[in-house]
């Protein structure tokens, strides 16, 4: 049981790092599109953030694979106890697959980085939600998929349109002092 606890802690750590990285990626992408030009420094920062997300995804994949295997070994003799975990495990594996596919699409230039990051936002936050969900309460997959889809479309729309509003929120430049 102590192994399951350690694996769960590292899984949660990977999700926290990934969700933090995607949040920084969104903020950085909004700042980058403000002037309609991505500078080399902004590009370099975005690459560091994407690498951080990939490392978090790899840590998540590894720890969750070991966690699922260990969970099955511990509870395989009592399938009635293991069944509530099955919906949650299938949702977690689906979300991990969505992240992998999104990274592949970004790498192959099938989708832009901005759309890819916008698609990753609901996925990383859904991972937080699903891991915090009590294991004894069954996840209603159809309701979860519906809510996730609405949130994903909304995130893509907001991030794609938000650059229109950032210009209005800029600080007014200060006038130079005459005393200098």
Image (cartoon, rainbow, N blue to C red):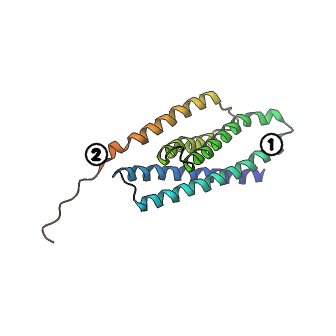
Q: In percent of the image, x 48 and y 56: which residue is there?
A: 46
Residue 27 falls left or right of residue 55: left
> Which mark lies nearer to you, 1 or 2?
2
Q: Nearer the viewer, residue 46 or 92?
A: 46
Q: Position of residue 35 (x, y in %)?
A: 33, 52
- Helix, strand or loop at disc 1? helix
Q: Position of residue 158 (x, y in %)?
A: 42, 39
The residue to which callout 2 is attached is: 168
Quadrant of the rendered structure where residue 132 is?
top right
Residue 144 is labelled as: none
Dot 1 or dot 2: first in sequence order is 1
Residue 131 falls left or right of residue 147: right
Q: Residues within 10 Å of mark 2 (few under 14, many from 20)?
A: few
Q: Position of residue 153 (x, y in %)?
A: 49, 34
Outermost residue toward the top in this view: 142
- Helix, strand or loop at disc 2? helix
The residue to which callout 1 is attached is: 72
Numbered marks: total: 2
> Could you tell me if residue 140 is visible in this image?
no
Q: In percent of the image, x 40 and y 49: which residue is there?
A: 30
> What distance separates the C-alpha of mark 1 from that of mark 2?
54 Å
């Amino acid at each position: 049981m102590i192994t399951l606890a350690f694996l769960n802690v590292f899984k949660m750590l990977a999700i926290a790092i990934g969700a933090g990285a995607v949040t920084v990626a969104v903020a950085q992408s909004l700042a980058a599109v403000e002037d309609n030009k991505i500078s080399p420094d902004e590009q370099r920062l975005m690459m560091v953030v994407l690498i951080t997300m990939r490392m978090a995804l790899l840590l998540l994949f590894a720890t969750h694979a070991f966690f699922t295997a260990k969970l099955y070994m511990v509870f395989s003799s009592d399938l009635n106890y293991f069944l509530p975990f099955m919906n949650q495990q299938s949702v977690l594996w689906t979300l991990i697959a969505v992240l992998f596919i999104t990274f592949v699409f970004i790498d192959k230039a099938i989708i832009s980085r901005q759309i890819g990051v916008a698609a990753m936002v609901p996925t990383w936050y859904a991972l937080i939600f699903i891991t915090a969900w009590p294991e004894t309460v069954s996840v209603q997959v159809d309701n979860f998929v519906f809510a996730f889809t609405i949130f994903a479309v909304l995130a893509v729309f907001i991030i794609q349109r938000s650059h229109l509003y950032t210009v209005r929120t800029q600080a007014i430049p200060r006038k130079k002092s005459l005393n200098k």
